Amino acid sequence: MSGPLERRAVVAELLRERGDLLLVTGLGGTTWDAAAVADHDNNFYLWGGMGLAVATGLGLALAQPQRQVLVITGDGEMLMGMGSLATVANRGPTNLAIAVIDNERYGETGEQLTHTAGTTDLAAIALANGISDSREITDFDGVTTYRERLHAGGDSCFAAIKVQAGNPTMVLPPRDGIMVKYRFRAALGLGGV
């Protein structure tokens, strides 16, 4: 059974008072959720890279150790990229937070149940891989506490946030990948090329 939280409210809370936080989103719903909050130069949207959000966020965290990095992705995408959790734990960046918006559904392909609707516990998997600050969140106070934690830094952290099933209205950010890449590079102070 999916959770009680509304996904857009969760993402808005995670991005509240974001400062210079760098954001990597998984494909589909979490990209639309972030765009619904606000398109931002520090947002890196993955289009069609299912399973790669955490790996991309890890690379960014290692390359930009002075900046906090947040990955917001869905449960289906996280299930596809679970191996990246072991690499996060072994590399141990101190500036990486992962928030999985877990509606227990594959929202892009027809709302089929994911394994998190059954016995699969993503927070337990992250913990077993070595991410010691791993939690499941089912209430809004937990989201606020996690937002504060991700800005504090320290060891990498992981949250599986249980949200209601269903997809809100699509809010598309820029879909020009080259423009998003150059805009993101400029926001990092790396120039446009």
Image (cartoon, grey):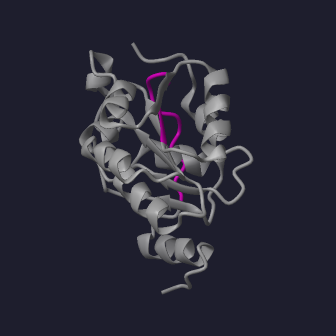
Compared to 83, does 127 lie above or below?
above
Q: Is residue 45 visible?
A: yes
Compared to 128, does 18 lie above or below?
below
Q: Can residue 162 be found in the magenta stretch?
A: yes
x%, y% of residue 49? 31, 56
x%, y% of residue 94? 52, 51
x%, y% of residue 33? 54, 43
Image quadrant in which the N terminus is located: top left
Compared to 76, does 38 lie above or below?
below
Q: Tell me the residue at 71%/43% (across/down).
A: 16
Which residues lie in the magenta part? Answer: 157-173
Q: Tell me the residue at 42%/70% (across/down).
A: 177
Q: Tell me the residue at 41%/46% (across/down).
A: 28
> Picture quarter containing residue 165?
top left
Q: Is residue 79 found left or right of 64 in the rendered image? A: left
Q: Tell me the residue at 60%/61% (across/down).
A: 67
Q: Can residue 12 be found in the magenta stretch?
A: no
Q: Is residue 19 found left or right of 99 in the rendered image? A: right
Total marks in image: 0
Residue placed furthest toward the top? 1
Q: Nearer the viewer, residue 119 or 10?
A: 119
Q: Is residue 161 visible?
A: no
